[in-house]
Amino acid sequence: MMGGRVSNSEYDALVKLCFNENPYGPPPSVLDAMTGAFKYANRYGYPDGGIVEAIAVHHGVSPENVLIGSGSSEILDIVGTTFLVDHKKVVGVEPTFSAVYEHATGLKASAVRLALRADFHQDIPAIIKAVTDNRGEIGFVYLCNPNNPTGVIVTKEEVKQLLDALPADVPVLIDEAYHHFVENPAYATSIPYVSEGRPVIVTRTFSKIAAMAGMRLGYAIAPANLIQKMGPYIDVMNVNALAKWGGAAALKDTAALNKVRSDILQTRKKTTSALENMGYAVIPSEANFFMVNLRRPAGPVIQGFRKRGILVGRPFPPMFEYMRVSVGKPDEMERFMSAFEALMKA
Ligand code: PLP
């Protein structure tokens, strides 16, 4: 990670628009809960703040439908470890959050990576066809909703179309890391499918809306039989005491999370309008980041930003002329816009 290679002061001075983090930091309620949990730093058997029960209640499911992980990344890895045995394949689009494919490679499994549609939506009929054509070889389907890096949603109708068409033994991993930022009424969370007993594994994270990326807490909501299959691959002590207490506090502090949401959305809209007014198309996003079409290779522009102390997203093949930008605080986006104007004039 970038933060490991620079000094503290250099890191602090950088404008960090590269990892879709929350620029505001955790709300006071979460910081207080984490601070209170420090007293358990020397313990194994400490009270855990009731995090699993709190997540279950929050979603109206039972604790046996919940698996917590050290970030949702750990859950994504465990889904791969569990369902890609015997060189099974994962099916999904490209570009998307590629950690799932990278983990598959590490497992000596492989991925069927499908192109996005011309409008940057995920191609649901193509996913269904890929599963049908490779019947018996597919371990699971990965659907990132909204998708990272595009910020584009899969509609609730499309999710239903996919689930209705797939065989019951092919679970769908639905990654809702950016759920809280979606405004489009055509979107819905897929968690209700868990209560229906459908083979879905929905993942969420405290890294984005709750600003806990460095603390590492995420979870899966899934039918109990799928949670049980994954259970053996997870270390029960994977999540630290601070993250558990902080996460439980974050679930309660809806006012603070709503404020982050509205501030981020307002800043995103202001920035994307400014880019569009300059003549640069932006893919309509439902997340705390967006992609802008530079109409030239993104690599050198990304380097140009880096030279100006601004980190933006890496290139996302095959979208080589697009740049992904996370939404920061208003002053950070002003620095971004000044640099953008200077770099694009060059
Ligand atoms: N899923 C998506 C789509 C992401 O973009 C990210 C992080 O950027 C993650 C999962 C992993 O988040 P974490 O491991 O911090 O929960």
Image (cartoon, rainbow, N blue to C red):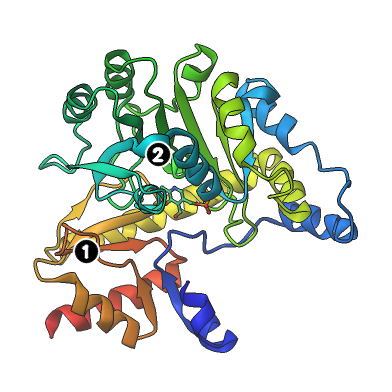
Looking at the image, which is closer to me, 31 or 221?
221
**Residue that numbered label 2 is attached to:** 182
* Amino acid, disc 1: Leu
Judge whether 126 appears above or below 80 on screen.
above
Q: Position of residue 82 (x, y in %)?
A: 49, 35
Label 2 element class = loop
User: Could you give the CA–CA distance between mark 1 and mark 2, rounded to whole angstroms?
Assistant: 21 Å
Any mark on residue 275, and which? 1
Looking at the image, which is closer to me, 269 or 9?
9
Q: Quadrant of residue 122?
A: top left
Q: Position of residue 202 (x, y in %)?
A: 48, 31
Q: Position of residue 91 (x, y in %)?
A: 28, 36
Q: Is residue 217 left or right of residue 334?
A: right
Q: Is residue 145 left or right of residue 264?
A: left
* Amino acid, disc 2: Val
Q: Image point 34% across, 49% down: which residue?
A: 101
Judge whether 329 appears above or below 237 on screen.
below
Looking at the image, which is closer to me, 284 or 95?
95
Label 2 crowd bin: few (<14), some (14–19), many (20+), radius 10 Å:
many
Looking at the image, which is closer to me, 78 or 207?
78
Q: Image point 30% across, 18% down: which residue?
A: 166
Judge whether 255 appears above or below 241 on screen.
above
Q: Image point 47% across, 44% down: which residue?
A: 177
Q: Is residue 343 left or right of residue 4?
A: left
Does residue 145 appear in the picture of this structure? no
